[in-house]
Every structure is written in C-alpha cells, then in structure tokens.
Image (spheres, rainbow, N blue to C red):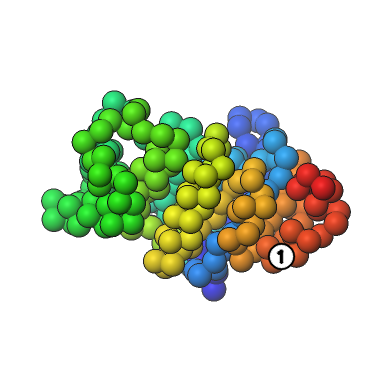
C-alpha cells in the first residue's frame, strides 16, 4: 500500500473551493514532485494533507489509516512533517534553539540525539549552532527548516518550494540534501517551481492545473512530454 493516498479531495478556503477532486499517492521509497502554474492549488493541497484545511469531501490515507479529519499536531505524531515556503524558522532564535523547538515534545535524551543527527546531516548548522536564524543565508535557513521537521522523525516530508529565492549554487546544495534525506528512508513530496531540478531527483510527478489533476507519470515522462514542456516547463 502507498504511504500516502489522497482520494478525490475537494478543499479550499471558506466557501471557495480551490481543489476540485485531486488525487495523488506517494510510495514509501519515493520522491514525488507536484508542478503546475500559480493558483493551481499546490500549496492548498499541502495544507489539506497536513490538516490546516479540512477537505469538504474526499479522503486522506496515511500509512493505511484515514487521517482526513486529524489536526496538524496529530498528523505530526503519525509521521508527517511539513516545511512551508515562508516563515519556516524562528528568526530571533539560534540554530540550536530552533531545533529544540522542532523537537519540543521529545524527552531530553531523544532531543539531544535528534539535534546531533541534524548536525551530522547538515554540518554547517553545527558550525553555526549559536547563530540566530535571521543571520543565515537562504540555503542555510532551508536546511534549518528541514532539520526542524526531521526532529519529529517523519516517514513523509512535505517541502513547499524548497529552492524559492535561492541562488543556483545554493539551489543545487539544497536538492543534494533532499536526496540525502531520502537516502535515509524518508518519503518526500515536493512542490517546486524549478520543475527540471525537482523532477530530476524524483521518481514520479503530478501536474495540477486549475485545482485538478492534469497529468501524472514518471519524472522522465513528464520532463520529456512535448505538451507538458510547452505548457508547464517553459518549452
């Protein structure tokens, strides 16, 4: 069974539906990328999966259990972690303090072990552990945000625009780190405007348009489909 299954979800804000019957799945050993134009409903889908929005209809299954109505903190306990595009760290806190916030529910020993694991994955954070998050570069902040999510030991990591605003060199570094996280056994679902870069490390992809499934297939199929390239990948 897939780790995550989203079935015919209709969701949005108030009386306005943004998603109109969207369905996706993620296997336990996959990286999956979702692409689509602005306003396609990608971030709304993530907020719905995470429980910030409750769908009007449809189901969300995680690890063979329905979690459609669960709140975000309950989904974190189940094994889902979410790194939003914006406001994903505490700027006035140090790197270590941010990691402690990410693992606030852990016992002291487990918390320290989680922090050491984060430092081993992202050595730059260890080097700068006493710096405040606001002093970090964009790429370093993304690494910190992912590390905070990892403090919960997730089975599935949702990444919303991990390369947004990054210079090309930092962009590459962040995606290399995403591959490293996946190698540790974490399934990853990504929303990304840099579709070529994200699909390049993915197993499969989905194309959303106007809140609906437009296409899905292997990452290579999406990258090489002439119509998709013209409409969604800049030709």
Q: SS at mark 1?
A: helix
Left of 21 or right of it: where is 175?
left
Could you say which quadrant of the image residue 48 lies in?
Answer: top right
Horizontal and vertical percent position of residue 79: 39, 58
- Kindly identify the residue that appears in the image at 36 percent across and 33 percent down: 136
In the rendered view, would you say 12 is above or below 110? above
Q: Quadrant of the N terminus?
A: bottom right
- Kindly identify the residue that appears in the image at 47 percent across and 50 percent down: 173
Most distant residue in the bottom direction: 1
- Kindly identify the residue that appears in the image at 82 percent across and 47 percent down: 235
User: What number of labels is visible?
Assistant: 1
Q: Which residue is mark 1?
A: 220
Residue in the foreground of this view, choosing between 53 and 164: 164
Could you say which quadrant of the image residue 101 lies in?
Answer: top left
In the rendered view, would you say 230 is above or below 1? above
Horizontal and vertical percent position of residue 72: 42, 44
- Kindly identify the residue that appears in the image at 13 percent across and 51 percent down: 108
Horizontal and vertical percent position of residue 233: 75, 48
In the rendered view, would you say 24 is above or below 94? below
Left of 181 or right of it: where is 124?
left
Horizontal and vertical percent position of residue 141: 40, 38
Residue 74 in view (yes/no): no
């Amino acid at each position: 069974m897939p780790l995550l299954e989203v079935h015919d979800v209709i969701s949005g804000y108030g009386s306005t539906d943004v998603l109109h019957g969207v369905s996706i799945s993620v296997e336990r050993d996959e990286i999956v990328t979702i692409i689509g134009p602005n306003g396609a409903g990608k971030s709304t889908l993530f907020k719905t999966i995470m429980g910030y929005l409750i769908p009007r209809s449809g189901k969300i299954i995680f690890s063979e259990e329905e979690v459609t109505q669960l709140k975000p903190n309950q989904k974190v306990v189940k094994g889902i972690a979410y790194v939003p595009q914006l406001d994903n760290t505490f700027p006035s806190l140090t790197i270590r303090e941010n990691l402690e916030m990410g693992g606030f529910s852990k016992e002291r020993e487990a918390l320290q072990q989680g922090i050491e694991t984060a430092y081993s994955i992202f050595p730059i954070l260890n080097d700068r552990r006493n710096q405040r998050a606001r002093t970090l570069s964009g790429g370093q902040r993304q690494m910190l945000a992912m590390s905070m999510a990892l403090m919960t030991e997730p089975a599935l990591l949702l990444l919303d625009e991990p390369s947004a605003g990054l210079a090309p060199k930092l962009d590459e570094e962040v995606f290399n780190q995403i591959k490293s996280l996946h190698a540790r056994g974490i399934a990853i679902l990504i929303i990304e405007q840099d579709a070529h870069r994200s699909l390049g490390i993915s197993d499969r992809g989905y194309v959303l348009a106007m809140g609906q499934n437009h296409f899905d297939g292997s990452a290579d199929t999406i990258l090489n489909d002439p119509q998709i390239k013209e409409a969604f990948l800049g030709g």
